Amino acid sequence: MRHSCPVCGGKEIAHVVYRDVKGFDLVRCGSCKVVHLSPLPSEENIRCIYSQSYFRDSLEKHGYLDYDQEHAFINATYRRRFRRISTLLRPRDRPLRMHEIGCAMGFGLDVGARQFGWDVSGSDISAYAVERSGALGYPAVQSDSLGRCDLPFRRPDLICLFDVIEHLPRVHSFRDWLSGQMAPGALLAMTTMDMDSFWNRFLGRRSPSIKVPEHLTYFTTQTLKVAMGSMFRLVYASADIQTVSASLLARRILNVLGLRPSQWGALRSLPTVIPNGMKLYVFERT
């Protein structure tokens, strides 16, 4: 177990934000002011979380109830995000090269290739996820616990990092590696929680954004800008909107209320669009 900040490596704690959340505290770093888990799990323990069961977890201990079952809704979320990102892309005389870090089953790669005409590749900490992405016909490689890998495409025009940065145990090391993979002017699109959002403030420690121990860092727009440093310039930020099944939404509400989730089979096919306490950010490599 480590007590250092996953963003700056500092060991000074300004104060405890939430105490004893599943055996961990959420604390504010005295140096960079980001909120993070304390103590941090070891990188070996972090890697163990992302097995095949992470994507199909009937007990909802970690990860997803059933990632495959939400396929159509996940695709709808990807399409919405990609449409917004597309407005920021520069014209080019060749297909855009996109790499997704944390690509899971490759659903986003498929949307990017089939509906937007991009050349795509992916990476994920989970060997199972990499296998599934590769089965769709897209280049995919396994990353280390810090999110780093040998990119299949050199110097991609766009790197996507959806719901990933909060999982990384050393954000500063990842950022430095990432900056070396991108040419000036390339875009980095990411989603992560905004702890300043209304829903996260209202729900407090009951917020679905607080997932222990897999979420290590809890950002606001300001602390994320600090984390990305001078190598990345924020060019876009907007509330993220997610499409989920009505059954998943019902289960999330029950979990927030501390009630036992039930099976909601009749609601599985009904799409629901919800604000999720997160933001979509786009940074430009300087």
Image: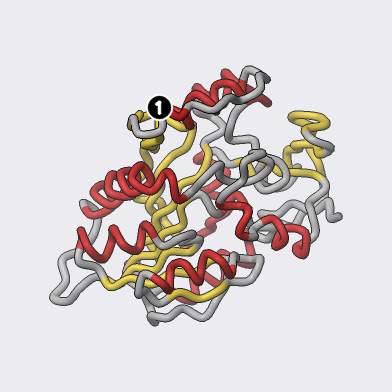
Say which element carries label 1: helix
Residue pictured at 55% horizontal, 76% vertical: 149
The answer to whether 29 appears left or right of 276 in the picture is right
* Relative to 241, residue 143 above or below: below
- Which of the pair 111/203 is nearer the observer? 111
Image quarter in which the C terminus is found: bottom left
Residue pictured at 59% horizontal, 66% vertical: 125
Q: Amino acid at mark 1?
A: Leu
Q: Quadrant of residue 218?
A: top right
Image quarter in which the N terminus is found: bottom right
The answer to whether 117 appears left or right of 148 in the picture is left
Residue pictured at 68% horizontal, 26% vertical: 205
The local crowd at label 1, few if under 14, some if 14 to 19, many if 20 or more residues have their Cα within 10 Å, is some
* Relative to 228, residue 286 above or below: below
Q: Quadrant of residue 209?
A: top right
Residue 89 location (% of width, % of height): 23, 60
Residue 19 location (% of width, % of height): 81, 29
The answer to whether 59 appears left or right of 127 in the picture is right
